[in-house]
Amino acid sequence: MTHDVIVVGVGAMGSAALWRLAARGKRVLGLERWDIPHAHGSSHGVSRIIRLPYYESADYVPLLRRAYELWRELEATTGREILVTTGSVDASAEDDPLFQGALASARDHDLAHEVLTGAEVNERFGGYRLPAHHRALFQPDGGLVASERAIVAHVEAAQALGAEVRARERVLSWEARRGGVVVTTTKRRYQAERLILAAGAWMGEIAPTLRRLAVPERQVLAWLQPHEPRLFGPDAFPVFNLQVDEGRFYGLPIYDVPGFKFGRYGHRGETGDPDTLAWEPDAEDEALLRGFAERYFPAGAGETLALRACMFTNTPDEHFIIDRHPEHDNVVLASPCSGHGYKFASVVGEILADLATGSGQTRHPIDFLRLDRLAAAA
């Protein structure tokens, strides 16, 4: 075989898998349809949130702890700043699943935290204007991951260990055979013992078994110029996850590019083929996001500096899919991650390396992310 493992998709998860595989001495090839990094998936836009008190499920917390360790290891290996600590705020009405889930997660895993009212958050962090009666969980270890920089760092670290990476080479098909796989691209055919599919919004196309389970969704992010920039720097503005009347929103401080960054989960509910969903933000996108900022972060709601569209890829239960292919033990499926997966990329890379080598087992607790849980929805 030419390679031990081929990784299709060199984005958040795929690039991390390349590094972990190369670090184990594997002959690994990464194939990317677009540039490295690129703006056609869910990882561009400079930064992504990382937070420990995971309201979505406390089962994610052990994975997050390992993710933090691996992000720091990547920084030490490459000399790049990847993980920036700002603290995190998870806020909603007191009886909402967001606050209650974050609180339960923090308590279950003995995470350092404070419970604050919305008024107390506003007093401590001057950029915020939350409803006074809301409840918020502040956790000091939250922050941001420099998303595009991390992809570059993972690729460079993998290449330094001998990994081969090819961009602008679209995979047309793959075939699992006894003892190996064959991958056909727009340029040539490759052979390997095992295959990892980490194609983001194109997972349903490249792995038809996921077609009904991996639904691309258009998302738009905004960067606004704060009226008071000092309130929105990484040292003064915690990342947030906020449930309000208008929906669930998330946001990050000014980092690396001008502007306070935020978006709305679900945005305008646009799903479909990632090749036909609109990539250019429009006036309706801007109005939706600006209305939120003007109400809850008025000191940050200055001029629009940037609007960018990206793709989330959602499962029916909004948890990840990380598993071996149900018909081919030598093919590993990596995600989709339902709009909250980037922070886990470092540890998912390690998990994928586990699943694609040796016995195909991992020490990490991923049973709740296995494909068979979604059998009824397939």
Image (tube, helix red, strand yellow):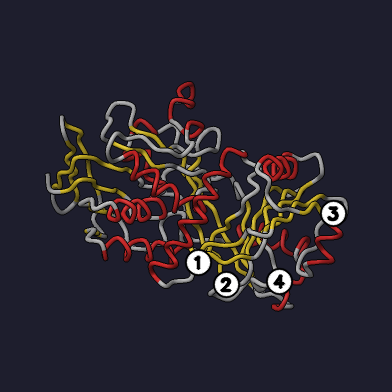
> Are there few (<14), some (14-19), or many (20+) residues within 10 Å of tag 4?
some
Q: How many angstroms separate mark 2 from mark 3 (CA)? A: 27 Å
Mark 4, mark 1: which one is toward the viewer? 4
Which residue position is annotated with label 3? Answer: 117
Whether the residues at callouts 1 and 2 have beta carbons within 8 Å, the answer is yes
Reading the image, the residue beneath label 4 is: 236
In the image, what residue type sits under mark 3? Thr
Where does the image place residue 85, in percent across and percent down from the top left? 61, 65
Front-most of residues 174 and 120: 120
Asked if 61 appears above or below 30 in the picture, the reply is: above
- Is 109 displayed left or right of 34 in the figure? right
* Mark 1 / mark 3, whichever is N-terminal: 1
Q: Residue at position x 34%, y 33% from top?
A: 324
Q: Badge 1 is on which residue?
A: 46
Residue depicted at x 28% and y 51%:
24
Q: CA distance from mark 1 to mark 3?
A: 30 Å
* Front tag of 1 and 3: 3
Q: What separation in Å lies between label 4 and label 1 (alpha carbons)?
A: 19 Å
Q: Is residue 148 left or right of residue 157?
A: right
Q: Quadrant of residue 126?
A: bottom right
Q: Earlier in the sequence, mark 4 or mark 3?
A: 3
Distance from the alpha carbon under mark 1 to that under mark 2: 8 Å
